[in-house]
Image: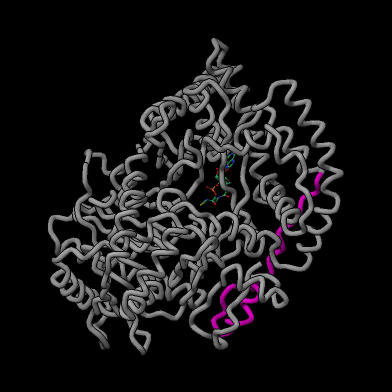
């Protein structure tokens, strides 16, 4: 349970979700984080259910157990399967009381899952946000010939982002829809001005919607730059360029890498955060200015070890920054949005995942990319301040923390391999022409590629948006199915094309069916999480199913995937969920598909490059069997 800070005045520009001990002390005031924040910030019209969206449903236990059994079957032998069946019968009895509590919670909150999800998936997650949680988004590549090119692009990018922020504030952005259903737009309201706050055991999240400044990071220096004046006006491109030039001139010296602390394990950062702020009051003030900024813009130095593949280079630059010898300290990883501008024109962003899913970030990216292409002709405006350097002083204690964080970051950097690519043979138009779902087609290709490499079924996570419900975020699509494994096996045997096409269609249809259930809130994973959370909160023993091999194996997601669609030639990319897995984010466009692929180098079984090569050949094989079977019908 989470609450709004009672210390902040009504309509304060800063909204804070408090840490756990405070929560317990304030429990009587609690309902749901979003409705409470809504009451406090009503003048800002944030977090409102103004679309009258329905509430996330609670599936029945029978629905979940039936779907669960099918989804775990690929991972079990007969004996294990029989045991799981017995446990599922027991589970139905054991969860009677848990389900009642869950249904009660659903009736009394706008979204029974929202605050559990925020805390379990994000705020209580203690690994670094870098690599383990925050994705990168690679924009279409630019080619900067000199610093002037880079600054001109940066100025327009900043103005595009600020313009988008103002459009969000004025409820001017188009409503997202899934088919005819309107989607919850609250995530958009949490993109700008938001910052994760490091705390022991459970982080906080702070919203600063009314901020008017951004922060520019360069050579580990941070500068506060006003982008909206007191009359609500934004500067012209040339005004911004001259401010950026001033910043460039004032940041020739490399500052101590305090930003690297934000890339450490969360409990370490929570400790070093206190140490850093205690060195002197100006440190605390600088931290606050960064936290309150609308977003960061990181003017990066060249990445170490550039291997010529700009998509993979961008993937690394926007996931982690290249380590202590690269740009990892030229960041503040707690900020929701950090735009990153490489010297050569590799541009993109990294985003802290807790307030928003990737799709709103992708929609914002399209807006900014289009904005940059336009002839932006804003008049000069009254500037009320020059860029202000945010100073940091460090002592030996901070230095020690920096050394420790450097080691953590460099280990993560060395461990992450990426091989991101554009698949150009066809895009979603071809799949649609076959009367198949493009998303399911791609998912089944990923399943087939995994099976082809490893010859075992790979548990496979795909995000499905549950934004047709108020405050909805995601449900898991379990993409590994009896049918997906049967298809992979069929492809690897000398079967006829018609057998292969039949197996492909069966796998795609099974995936599509699960996807539809998931977007409607009827997957299995969030329900299982909800029942578990009730048991933990009410101190009821956990059903034995949670210790079963079926549970462990089917949730050891060796493929972590999601569709993040942009119109522009960009893509999102993130690390695998498991040490022996792959990250594979994709952007299906009409005639091509961008993939962001990753694997951990420490695992001998996985390789991002082998996965890229195999996925490419699987997509082509799937195309060819469909094309041949169509030809044979003519
Ligand atoms: N024949 C012809 N066309 C078909 C088809 C078929 N059998 N099945 C689907 N299509 C069409 C659809 O109508 C749609 O057309 P459009 O491009 O004109 O809108 C298009 O193909 C794409 O549909 P499909 O590929 O089936 O899936 P989708 O775009 O609905 O995406 C999910 C499915 C699950 C990815 C989506 O619902 C979702 O949840 N997205 C968000 C994921 C997310 O949260 N990502 C961020 C995580 S950080």
Give percent across and percent down for residue 531: 74, 51
Residue at 45 percent of width and 74 percent of height: 167
Q: Residue furthest top?
A: 494
Quarter of the image with the C terminus in it: top right
Give percent across and percent down for residue 122: 54, 57
Quadrant assignment, res 590: top left
> Could you tell whether 476 is left or right of 56 in the image?
left
- In the image shown, does 160 or 40 lie closer to the viewer? 40
> Could you tell whether 403 is left or right of 585 in the image?
left
> Could you tell whether 267 is left or right of 61 in the image?
left
- In the image shown, does 202 or 61 lie closer to the viewer? 202
Secondary structure of the magenta portion, mostly? Answer: loop
Q: Residue furthest front?
A: 396
Quadrant assignment, res 283: bottom left
Residue at 35 percent of width and 38 percent of height: 417
Give the residues in magenta: 34-61
Q: How many marks?
A: 0
Quarter of the image with the N terminus in it: bottom right
- In the image shown, does 1 or 572 lie closer to the viewer? 1
Q: Is residue 589 visible?
A: no
- In the image shown, does 21 or 198 lie closer to the viewer? 21
In the rendered structure, does residue 298 fall within the stretch colored magenta? no
Determine whether 12 is above or below 88 in the image: below
Determine whether 634 is above or below 159 in the image: above
Residue at 34 percent of width and 52 percent of height: 318
> Could you tell whether 197 is left or right of 468 in the image?
left
Give percent across and percent down for residue 171: 52, 74
Q: Is residue 106 visible?
A: yes
């Amino acid at each position: 349970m989470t609450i709004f800070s009672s210390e902040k005045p009504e309509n304060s520009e800063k909204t804070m979700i408090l840490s756990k001990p405070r929560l317990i002390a304030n429990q009587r005031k609690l309902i749901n984080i979003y409705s409470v924040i809504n009451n406090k910030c009503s003048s800002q019209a944030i977090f409102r259910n103004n679309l009258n969206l329905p509430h996330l449903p609670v599936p029945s236990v029978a629905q979940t157990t039936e779907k669960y059994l099918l989804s775990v079957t690929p991972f079990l032998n007969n004996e294990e399967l029989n045991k799981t069946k017995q446990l599922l019968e027991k589970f139905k009895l054991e969860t009677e009381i848990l389900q009642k509590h869950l249904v009660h919670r659903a009736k009394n909150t706008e979204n029974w899952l929202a605050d559990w999800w925020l805390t379990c998936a994000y705020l209580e997650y203690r690994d670094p946000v870098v690599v383990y949680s925050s994705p990168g988004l690679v924009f279409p590549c630019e080619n900067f010939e000199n610093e002037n090119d880079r600054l001109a692009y940066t100025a327009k990018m900043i103005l595009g982002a600020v313009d988008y922020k103002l459009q969000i504030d004025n409820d001017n952005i188009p409503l997202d829809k899934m088919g005819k259903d309107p989607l919850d737009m609250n995530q958009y309201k949490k993109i700008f001005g938001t910052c994760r706050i490091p705390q022991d055991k459970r982080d906080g999240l702070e919203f600063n919607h009314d901020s008017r400044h951004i922060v520019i990071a360069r050579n580990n220096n941070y500068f506060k730059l006003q982008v909206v004046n007191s009359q609500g006006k934004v500067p012209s491109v040339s005004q911004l360029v001259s401010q950026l030039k001033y910043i460039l001139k004032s940041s020739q010296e490399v500052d101590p890498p305090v930003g690297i602390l934000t890339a450490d394990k969360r409990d370490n950062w929570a400790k070093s955060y206190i140490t850093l702020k205690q060195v002197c009051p100006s440190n605390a003030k600088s931290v606050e200015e960064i936290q309150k900024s609308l977003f960061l813009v990181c003017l990066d130095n060249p990445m170490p070890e550039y291997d010529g593949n700009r998509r993979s280079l961008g993937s690394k630059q926007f996931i982690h920054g290249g380590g202590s010898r690269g740009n990892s300290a030229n960041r503040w990883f707690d900020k929701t949005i950090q735009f990153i501008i490489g010297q050569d024109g590799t541009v993109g962003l990294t985003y802290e995942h807790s307030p928003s899913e990737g799709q709103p970030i992708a929609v914002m990216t399209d807006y900014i990319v289009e904005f940059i292409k336009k002839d932006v002709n804003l008049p000069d405006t009254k500037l009320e301040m020059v860029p202000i350097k945010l100073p940091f002083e460090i002592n030996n204690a901070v230095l020690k923390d920096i050394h420790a964080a450097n080691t953590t970051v460099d280990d993560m950097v060395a461990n992450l391999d990426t091989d991101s690519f554009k698949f150009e043979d066809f895009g979603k138009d071809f799949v649609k022409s076959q009367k198949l779902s493009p998303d399911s087609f791609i998912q089944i290709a990923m399943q087939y590629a995994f099976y082809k490499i490893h010859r075992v079924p790979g548990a496979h996570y795909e995000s499905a948006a549950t934004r047709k419900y108020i405050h909805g975020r995601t449900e898991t699509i379990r993409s590994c199915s009896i049918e997906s494994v049967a298809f992979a096996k069929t492809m690897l045997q000398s079967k006829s094309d018609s057998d292969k096409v039949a197996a492909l269609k069966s796998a795609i249809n099974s995936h599509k069916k699960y996807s539809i259930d998931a977007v409607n809130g009827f997957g299995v994973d969030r329900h299982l999480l909800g029942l578990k959370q009730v048991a933990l909160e009410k101190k009821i023993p956990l059903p034995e199913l949670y210790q079963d091999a079926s549970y462990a194996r089917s949730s050891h997601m060796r493929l972590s995937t999601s569709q993040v669609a942009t119109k522009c030639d960009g893509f999102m990319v993130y690390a695998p969920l498991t040490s022996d897995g792959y990250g594979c984010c994709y952007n299906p466009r009409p005639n091509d598909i961008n993939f962001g692929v990753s694997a951990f180098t420490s695992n001998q079984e996985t390789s991002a490059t082998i996965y890229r090569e195999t996925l490419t050949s699987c997509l082509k094989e799937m195309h060819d069997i469909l094309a041949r079977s169509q030809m044979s019908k003519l």
